[in-house]
Image: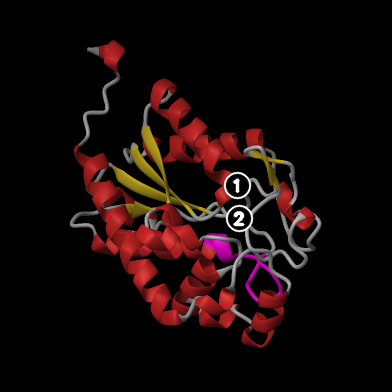
């Protein structure tokens, strides 16, 4: 059940304690891919994972602005502080739990959100009346994960599959030409760069031409299967804390 489309009476009839909160970002993805890429992909994976899961799940509206200041030099990028982001996610989960949906998977599509999501999920689980775990789709696609860049092959492939109109195909070659090979500027195991503009001319990392729609379909299947497996584990997990035993 998608809360955006449901009525309150539909929500009242939901017989589940399981919810998914898609989490993304609004930020540059090169000259070819939509600013909303991370939210679009997070929501697509959330929907596919719920469809693959054998049970009822409530799907919340996506969090579409995240921790993305590292892309601030590129117009259109929006961001909030980690504190604001954590508070927003925590209070959204709290409102889900108020209605009885107190086992929540945070389905994430943006790398910059990862540390904050893990931290806030721990806080929710330890201090609030809910259990939350983060899930980042591009970490759950097998060997494809090694190709994750930014606006590169994986994100472009998934967009081409789930929302092809969000990819400006006439700009893919320019995106490829201005891309960097890797994320960051590394010395002695340390990333010297804080902003993506320090190491990529046009915001792209990786080759978007290597991400066709067929690959996107495979990525969606892999991510959906992984999310469905996680939902089953969360649904069955003993969520009492050790100190409560």
Magenta stretch prevailing secondary structure: loop
Residue 182 coordinates in the image, percent (x, y): 62, 58
Residue tagged 2: 25
- Quick check: 150 above or below 235? below
Residue tagged 1: 112
- Quick check: 219 above or below 58? below
Q: In which quadrant is the C terminus drawn?
A: top left
Element marked by disc 2: loop
Q: Residue at x 47, y 80 (%)?
A: 212
Residue 96 in which image quadrant: top left
As rendered, which of 29 and 147 lies closer to the eye? 147
Q: Which mark is residue 187?
A: none
The answer to the question of whether label 2 and label 1 lie on touching residues, with beta carbons closer than 8 A, is yes
Residue 243 coordinates in the image, percent (x, y): 30, 11
Q: Residue at x 51, y 39 (%)?
A: 117
> Which residues fall within the magenta stretch?
29-39
Q: Residues within 10 Å of mark 2 (few under 14, many from 20)?
A: many
């Amino acid at each position: 059940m998608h809360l955006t489309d449901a009525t309150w009476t539909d929500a009242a009839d939901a017989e589940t304690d399981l919810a998914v909160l898609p989490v993304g970002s609004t930020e540059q993805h090169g000259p070819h891919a939509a600013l909303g890429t991370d939210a679009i992909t997070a929501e697509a994976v959330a929907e596919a994972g719920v469809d693959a899961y054998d049970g009822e799940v409530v799907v919340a509206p996506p969090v579409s602005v995240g921790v993305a200041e590292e892309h601030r030099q590129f117009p259109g990028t929006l961001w909030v502080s980690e504190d604001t982001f954590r508070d927003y996610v925590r209070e959204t989960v709290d409102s889900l739990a108020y209605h009885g949906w107190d086992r929540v998977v945070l389905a994430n599509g943006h790398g910059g959100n990862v540390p904050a999501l893990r931290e806030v999920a721990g806080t929710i689980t330890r201090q609030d009346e809910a259990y939350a775990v983060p899930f980042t789709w591009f970490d759950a696609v097998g060997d494809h994960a090694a190709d994750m860049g930014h606006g590169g092959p994986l994100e472009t492939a998934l967009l081409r599959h789930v929302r092809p109109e969000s990819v400006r195909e006439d700009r893919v070659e320019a995106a490829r030409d201005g891309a960097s090979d890797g994320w960051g500027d590394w010395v002695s195991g340390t990333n010297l760069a804080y902003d993506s503009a320090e190491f990529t001319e046009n915001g792209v990392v990786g080759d978007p031409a290597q991400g066709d729609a067929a690959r996107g379909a495979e990525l969606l299947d892999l991510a959906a299967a992984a999310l469905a497996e996680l939902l089953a584990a969360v649904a069955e997990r003993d969520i009492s804390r050790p100190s409560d035993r």
